[in-house]
Image (tube, coloured by chain):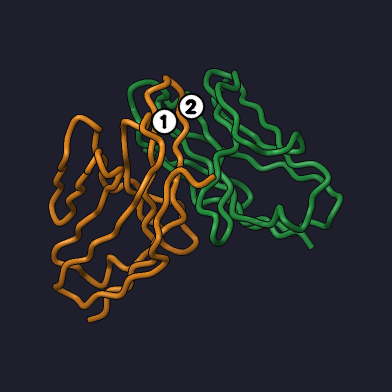
Chain colours: A green, B orange
């Protein structure tokens, strides 16, 4: 089966701009979670969506938002980009119920200049 | 507040020897633990997991040990192979019904021939 697909793979944006990242989960998976990976910080949880509803949210400012569509595809948006938002953004999917292991996508590398 | 800690940022091991990666956690509510492996430019891939009702889980060359009283888990790789060279993340989850893994900062393992 196809894996988790994240687009785009790489992105360069300017401070103050906004960006939208996309994630298509494994077919049949209804849960999509987003993580930010920065050097020295590991993976920081952003939010999780299940059946189009945000079920859980991490400690990120309101500039970070997301949504999930009826086909389980998810997008995350970052507005008013800051230099510190430069990171690898990872999306993971699972069935959202008894499956506690994620399948991750390859990530979107965002660079803010 | 780093609830999951991997205090060794890097580890070097010779091929054929044992690799031991350590992870400590502070939240006693965590009841499920996972290890992920990550190669550059790829998303993390699930390696092995352990429930808090067990103290050991084995899968081929990989064994995870859990010491709940010490809030410590470790991943043993025996024998280590050059292809095991990657960043290893431990992660913890609470049985809240939500999907929210708390990750450590990772340990870079280098296995030399």
Looking at the image, the residue that sits furthest to the right is A16
- Please identify the residue farthest to the front as the structure is shown: B69
Q: Secondary structure at mark 1?
A: strand
Provide the chain ID for the residue under circle 2.
A
Query: Who comes first in sequence, dot 2 or dot 1?
Result: 2
Label 2 sits on residue:
A31
Quarter of the figure with the C terminus of chain B: bottom left
Residue A105, x across and y down, in percent: 48, 46
Q: Determine whether A49 is above or below A45 in the image.
A: above
Which SS class for mark 2? strand
| B102, B99: nearer the viewer | B102
Q: Chain of mark 1?
A: A
> In the rendered view, would you say B35 is above or below B113?
above
Circle 2 packing at 10 Å, graded few (<14), some (14-19), many (20+), is many
Identify the mark at residue A94; answer none if there is no mark.
1
Q: What is the distance, in whole Å, between disc 2 and disc 1 at their CAs?
A: 5 Å
| Image quadrant where one finds the N terminus of chain B | top right
The residue lying toward the viewer, choosing from A43 and B8, is B8
Residue B11 vertical placement versus B28 (above, below):
below
x, y (%) of residue B98? 46, 23
Question: How many numbered discs sit on the rendered protein?
Answer: 2
Write the residue at 84% across / 49% down. A17
Asked if A88 appears above or below B55 in the picture, the reply is below
Q: Which mark is residue B28?
A: none
| Residues at marks 2 and 1 touching, judged by CB atoms closer than 8 Å | yes
Residue located 51% across and 48% down the image: A43
Q: Quadrant of residue A40?
A: bottom right
Residue at (30%, 75%) from the top-left corner? B12
Left or right: residue B35 versus residue A76 is left
Residue at 23 percent of width and 62 percent of height: B20
Q: Is residue A86 left or right of residue B108?
A: right
Mark 1, other Cα within 10 Å: few <14 / some 14–19 / many ≥20: many
């Amino acid at each position: 089966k196809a894996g988790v697909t994240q687009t785009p793979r790489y992105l360069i944006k300017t401070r103050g701009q906004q960006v939208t990242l996309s994630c298509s989960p494994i077919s049949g998976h209804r849960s999509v979670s987003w993580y930010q990976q920065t050097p020295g910080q590991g993976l920081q949880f952003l939010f999780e969506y299940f059946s189009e509803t945000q079920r859980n949210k991490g400690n990120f400012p309101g500039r970070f938002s997301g949504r999930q569509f009826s086909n389980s595809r998810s997008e995350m948006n970052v507005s008013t980009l800051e230099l510190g938002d430069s990171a690898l953004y990872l999306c993971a999917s699972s069935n959202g119920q008894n499956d506690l292991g994620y399948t991750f996508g390859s990530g979107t590398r965002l660079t803010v200049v | 507040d780093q609830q999951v800690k991997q205090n060794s940022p890097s580890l070097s091991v010779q091929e054929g020897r044992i690799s031991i990666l350590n992870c400590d956690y502070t939240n006693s509510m965590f009841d499920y633990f996972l290890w992920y492996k990550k190669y550059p430019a790829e998303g993390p891939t699930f390696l092995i997991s352990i429930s808090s009702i067990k103290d050991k889980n084995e899968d081929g060359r990989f064994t995870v040990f859990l010491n709940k009283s010490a809030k410590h888990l470790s991943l043993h790789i025996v024998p280590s192979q050059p292809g095991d060279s990657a960043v290893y993340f431990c992660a913890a989850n609470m049985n809240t019904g939500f999907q929210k893994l708390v990750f450590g900062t990772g340990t870079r393992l280098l296995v030399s021939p």
